[in-house]
Image (cartoon, helix red, strand yellow):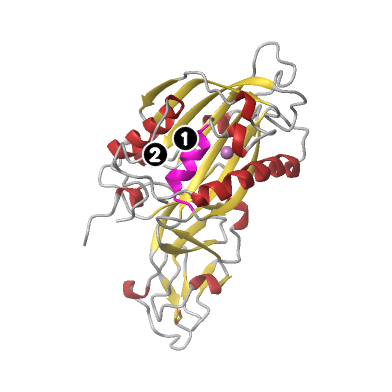
Amino acid sequence: MTEPTLEKTLWHPVALSHVIGTQPHAANLLGQALVLWRDGDGNAHAWADQCPHRGARLSLGRVHAGQLECPYHGWRFEAGGACTLVPAVPDFKPGPRCAATTFATREAYGMLWVRLAEPVDDALPIHDLPGFAAEAEPRLRKTTSGPYLVQASAPRIIENFLDMSHFGFVHEDWLGSRDRAEIPPYEVKPTPHGVLATGCLAWQPRSSIHAESGAQVEYTYEVTAPYTAVLTKQPEAGSTAIDGLWESIAMFVCPVTEETSVAWTRMAMNDFESPDARLIDFQNTIFGQDQPVLESQQPKRLPLAPDAEAHSAADRMSAAYRRYLKTSGIHFGVIR
Ligand code: FES
Ligand code: CO
């Protein structure tokens, strides 16, 4: 047996919790097809989407009496993966060879997280569930946008989320202005879980759905896992446009393959008035502006060599993110 790749030993988001019910749901993670389903106790499961009998997709089956039933010959599997019934031979006692392939799961941030392989050293910070501190703040309201299916690698999507210098062009009249595109110097430092950038300033014509006029906005950006980034908006003192509005947004990316991904944003906002649809619409608009550019980038995987692409001082965070991936042993989206 070959050693699992580091990426397979990390927690990855695969679906919003609420879409996983008694109807089996198909997903893909690192080239592995998954069936997601929920048992009678409400526990979510992620299994290989392949029946151990003749390889049919279990996601085409159904959940019956808290067990997953294969669509082909009706073999039934209990929550732990063991086969409990072979309908064609009811007296047969199925052994371990007949069990489904199961993976570890956790539910957090309104999502199901899956780990395909056990890490050799579980104590490393990289094996923790990706952090999103604002989730625990009860004074902030939580909403999720996505899934966004993107023909781009996970690290390219995270880099885009960390990048302020595209605001005036990709998000002109929304998050930035081409006439005020300058990004002043900001601080970047490594953390136990990734990288933190502070004092990130940008002029924004419409930094949120509440902004009625332009404002200089300060952000912190944090990478908390290889494919998770969090931005936190600091309200500027005296700014009426965003006065009292504090928000933190996480970008969670599932590496479906080396060059395709599914992304979600998790919003934690000091805003209990706006309907979910309005917050989600805003995110959809912003991500819809990013997507064609993301899908146009070549190469799709982040290049390995530090001098493979040109950099400016505004890319300090992007450079720190690449260094973090490299020192963590993440092979830039290459699944091995
Ligand atoms: Fe699943 Fe036969 S292939 S029961
Ligand atoms: Co963007």
Residue in front for this viewpoint, 335 or 181 = 181
Q: Of the residues shown, which amino acid type is indicated by label 1?
A: Gly
62 part of magenta stretch? no
- What is the quadrant of residue 328 in the picture? top left
Residue 296: where, in percent of width, then height?
50, 51
Which residue is identified by label 2? 128
Residue 62: where, in percent of width, then height?
57, 72
Q: Is residue 199 left or right of residue 301?
A: right
Q: Is residue 77 left or right of residue 215?
A: left
Q: Is residue 261 left or right of residue 304?
A: right
The structure residue drawn at horizontal position 47% and vertical position 29%, both measured from the top left corner, is 222
Q: Is residue 123 visible?
A: no
Q: Quadrant of the C terminus?
A: bottom left
Residue in front for this viewpoint, 300 or 265 = 300
Q: Residue furthest top?
A: 238
160 part of magenta stretch? yes
Q: Is residue 135 visible?
A: yes
Which residue is identified by label 1? 131
SS for tag 1? loop
Vertical position of residue 69 compared to residue 138: above or below: below
SS for tag 2? loop
Residue in front for this viewpoint, 180 or 6 = 180
- What is the quadrant of residue 50 in the picture? bottom left
Q: Which residues are magenta?
A: 152-163
- Mark 1 is surrounded, within 10 Å at the Cα level, by few (under 14), some (14 to 19) or many (20 or more) other residues, namely some
- Mark 2 is surrounded, within 10 Å at the Cα level, by few (under 14), some (14 to 19) or many (20 or more) other residues, namely some
